[in-house]
Image: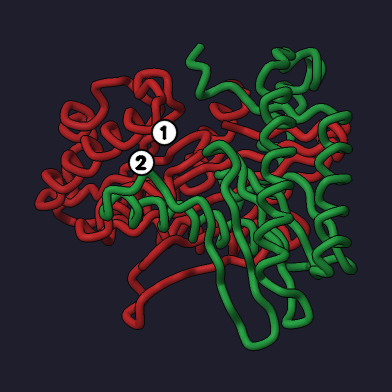
């Protein structure tokens, strides 16, 4: 099968490492929130103050912003923009790309200096790139992770929920 | 590619509705949003122009609940159909697991459908994916229009790959859930 179509499986151990990395990043920068997204906009891990209800929409929009900026980069004959910064009155978002696959974002307020966020995010992206590499190298089959009867159960659920 | 988070026991899949301008992609999502149970759907997010044409994308998260212990989520997107927004379509298509190609059945839209499908093939290939293996479901929308082409004619020009296809009238919901079921099953079979 086309390798681009196989799922990216994040094992428990790697997910724990990502959580730790993000929680250090929030703590050390004094930021409010850190998110790791897949380029498709799906949230892999989030860390920070409280639970954000809007996190799914936030993921989709940030990934959209990044994908759109990549197209802008191409028009400027750049491969992509590795980092993006969005400045608000109260909160700011700093976004960095990890190996064309993942997107790391830090949400912080004016109490945190952008320079510090930049430096520590760079350090975190290096760590996360190593985690991503390990995730990619593990070739677990779907059945190993989900169980062989998953597909049938999923089809039953789809039939049950997707109706007028 | 779909994302399986073993620690959080979550599965995420991204499905994109693609097709020429005004073919009914947003209407599909609106109908799904109106009709599915409130426990399943999230908010429908639309980035549209003042005239309600899609500018960037529409986004509808669906949470199917736990299946065999895994929280399963489908994220539905539409692309802006207008020719002008090709680069935006590339951006939205990024990382998708499957595509619903919505074709407008009206006679005078056939050429736009063909062009849009060609563009989709090119954009999928550019993302280093094999178009022949990529999960696609066809929807022939606006079957209620008096100038709708016969299905056999549309098949000849659009369905050379023999994809599953559904006839639809998205405004009233005909065929909308059949299409969603087909693409969901196809995406799950490729996990």
From the viewer's side, name the closer residue of A60 and A122: A122
Q: In the rendered picture, chain B carries what hue? A: red
Residue B44 screen position, x and y as percent: 58, 66
Residue B187 screen position, x and y as percent: 56, 29
Residue A59 screen position, x and y as percent: 64, 57
- In the picture of the structure, the residue carrying the numbered disc 1 is B137
Q: Which part of the image, by quadrant, shows the C terminus of chain B?
A: top right
Seen as rendered, the residue at the extreme bottom is A89
Mark 2 Cα-neighbour bin, 10 Å: few <14, some 14–19, many ≥20: many
From the viewer's side, name the closer residue of B10 and A149: B10
- Name the residue: 45% across, 56% down: B28
Above or below A137: residue A22? below
> Are tags 1 and 2 found on a single chain?
yes
Above or below B81: residue A8? above
Tag 1–tag 2 contact (CB < 8 Å)? yes
Give residue B14's quadrant in the image. Answer: top right
Mark 1 Cα-neighbour bin, 10 Å: few <14, some 14–19, many ≥20: many
Separation (CA) of disc 1 from disc 2: 6 Å
First in sequence: mark 1 vs mark 2: 2
The subunit letter for the residue under badge 1 reads B
Count of all numbered marks drawn on residues in the image: 2
Is B70 placed left or right of B114 in the picture? right
Q: In the rendered picture, chain A carries what hue? A: green
Please give the label number shown on residue B101. Answer: 2
Dot 1: element: strand
Q: Which part of the image, by quadrant, shows the N terminus of chain B?
A: top right
- Name the residue: 26% across, 53% down: A75
Give residue A134's quadrant in the image. Answer: top right
Give residue A117's quadrant in the image. Answer: bottom right
- Name the residue: 67% across, 25% down: A133
Is A45 placed left or right of B49 in the picture? right
């Amino acid at each position: 099968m086309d390798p681009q179509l196989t799922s990216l499986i994040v094992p428990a151990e790697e997910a724990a490492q990502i959580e730790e990395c993000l929680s250090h990043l929030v703590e050390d920068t004094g930021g409010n929130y850190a998110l790791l997204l897949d380029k498709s906009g799906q949230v892999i891990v989030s860390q920070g103050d409280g639970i954000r209800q809007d996190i799914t929409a936030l993921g989709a929009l940030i990934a959209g912003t990044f994908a759109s900026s990549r197209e802008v980069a191409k028009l400027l004959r750049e491969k992509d923009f590795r980092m993006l910064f969005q400045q608000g009155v109260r909160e700011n978002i700093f976004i960095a790309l990890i190996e064309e696959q993942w997107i790391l974002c830090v949400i912080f307020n004016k109490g945190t200096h952008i320079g510090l966020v930049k430096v520590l995010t760079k350090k975190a992206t290096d760590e996360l790139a190593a985690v991503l590499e390990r995730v990619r190298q593990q070739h677990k089959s779907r059945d190993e992770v989900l169980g062989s009867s998953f597909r049938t159960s999923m089809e039953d659920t789809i039939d049950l929920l997707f109706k007028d | 590619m779909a994302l399986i988070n073993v620690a959080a026991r979550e599965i995420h899949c991204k499905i994109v509705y693609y097709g020429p301008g005004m073919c009914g992609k947003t209407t599909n999502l609106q109908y799904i949003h109106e009709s599915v149970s409130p426990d399943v759907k999230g908010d429908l997010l639309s980035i549209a122009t003042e005239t309600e044409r899609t500018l960037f994308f529409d986004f509808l998260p669906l949470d199917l609940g736990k299946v065999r212990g895994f929280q399963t989520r489908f994220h539905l997107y539409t692309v802006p159909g207008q020719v002008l927004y090709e680069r935006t379509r590339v951006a939205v298509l990024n990382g998708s697991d499957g595509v619903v190609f919505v074709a407008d059945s009206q006679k005078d839209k056939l050429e736009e459908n063909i062009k849009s499908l060609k563009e989709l093939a090119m954009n999928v290939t550019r993302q280093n994916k094999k178009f022949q293996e990529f999960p696609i479901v066809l929807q022939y929308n606006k079957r209620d229009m008096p100038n709708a082409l016969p299905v056999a004619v549309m098949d000849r020009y659009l369905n050379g790959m023999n994809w599953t296809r559904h006839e639809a009238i998205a405004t009233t919901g005909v065929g909308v859930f059949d299409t969603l079921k087909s693409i969901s099953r196809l995406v799950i079979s490729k996990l």
